[in-house]
Image (spheres, helix red, strand yellow):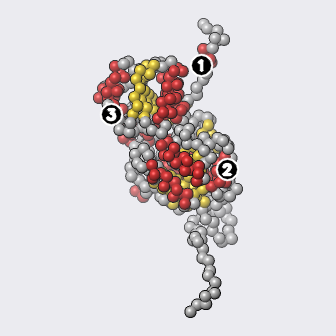
Amino acid sequence: MADQHDPRYAERMFPAPADHGIALPDRAVSTVRSGTDTAQSGDYKNERWYQGSGRIGERPVESIAVYPPTGGVTSQGDPFEPVKIGVLIDMDLGQLTADLMDPIILAVEDALNEGVYDRPVEIVTVDARGLPRENYRKVRLGYQKLVEDGCVVVIGPFISDNSVNVCDLVNSTGVACLGWTGTTRFAGEYCFTVANGDIPTEGWMGADWCFRNGYRKVGFFWEQGSSGDLYADYFRAAARHYGLDVIKETQLGPNPRNFQENLAAMREMGAEAIVYMGYGYSTFNFAKGFKALGWDPPRFMGTAFMFYSNSNAWAEGLEGWHGVDQLGEDGANPNYEAMLQRFEARFGRVSRNVVVALSYDTARAAIGGIGNARIATPEEVKAGLERIKWMPCTNGGPGCYLTFAEYDHRGYKGDFLTIRELRGGELHFRGYYRPQHPSNTSSPLLKQE
């Protein structure tokens, strides 16, 4: 019988860190060749340069460790546990999952090669798809799982509904999210964006495009949702500013009805252009409606336009649209072109769509915040993100950069919004969004000829 006074010994609560034993002296290295299971078959699907290169149904790798170059230095033998970056997938990515995950890997490897950080990094991914098609709670639980797993920063959510959904949770939990949403309603101490658009500005861009192209009578569609009223309010304000006549306005629900009838009414009322601001799920309804009516009007949509990369079928549905994009003029951004060269060298394939650039920039912000932090805790990484100034960007034009501050968590600045047209299966660059004061050309101080 054991003595009742024998001491009880404490065991480790958690396993000791383990080293994968893959570190190299001259470059960063990851535990995987690629971030999805598509790499096993090589069955990449991009038929055109702007389409997603993965395949429908591909799965991301749940955990990826990235080791910095050793530089020939031997540690004391005790391995460092990787610092964790979370990836919160909150939507159907179609054939874009590979173009999300692989640029994240490349961005972390690039940063470790540059000496931005000198410890291993682990990329932890959850697939927690939520609004608008699935239940709101899934995304919240996905974020909480990443927090419980020890992530110090999270990439995602990607769409506005889920960003608004988790906003309060993120700010109360205190692990920063780098969202892709363009809504102004994803805000607070721990909410950051590397935004795939700018919802209020997109409304103005649509009206500005109509005005500059001489379209004065406009049919307007907008979609119910967390930011639908933002789209609508800002487009209406811009239409008044430019003197446009919004001859008919249609609010779309999750499953639009009477779509063709609304288009036909707008045509009968003399619409010179159609503007659509929403999620993009109505794209196929538009395509069917235009085809049935034999009508090919000038048309403009917000950042839902960039779903051309989600699937090849979606790209076909966007034929004939102008829309808000983020890729700069072809060949103009040296950061984008150089990143694509490294991407091809690293993964042995070519993919040039906007998600590749967006994903890379977001991951560079995440590892930059970790590198700037005094210690690897969520609070210090948040402060590290706020220290990022004029970070080079692969998205947008050559004047696009990313910067944060204590009260400025909207990262992209400069030429990060562009206009492109999908016509004849080709994606054409139609310019940057660079508005000017009307007084530049119409001031009474200027001599009128």
Residue under label 1, please give it: 438
Which residue type does callout 2 highlight? Ala
Indicate whether 286 appears above or below 156.
above
Which residue corresponds to mark 3?
257
Which residue appears farthest toward the right when viewing the image? Answer: 374
Q: Residue furthest bottom?
A: 1
Q: Earlier in the sequence, mark 1 or mark 2?
A: 2
Q: Of the residues under marks 3 and 1, which one precedes in the sequence?
A: 3
Horizontal and vertical percent position of residue 279: 44, 38
What's the residue type where badge 3 is placed?
Answer: Arg
Residue 303, position as x, y percentages in the image: 48, 36
Front-lying residue, 243 or 189? 189
Name the amino acid type tagged 1.
Pro
Helix, strand or loop for disc 2: helix
Q: Residue at x 40, y 45 (%)?
A: 133
Any part of residue 343 in sight: no
Query: Which residue extends farthest top?
Result: 449
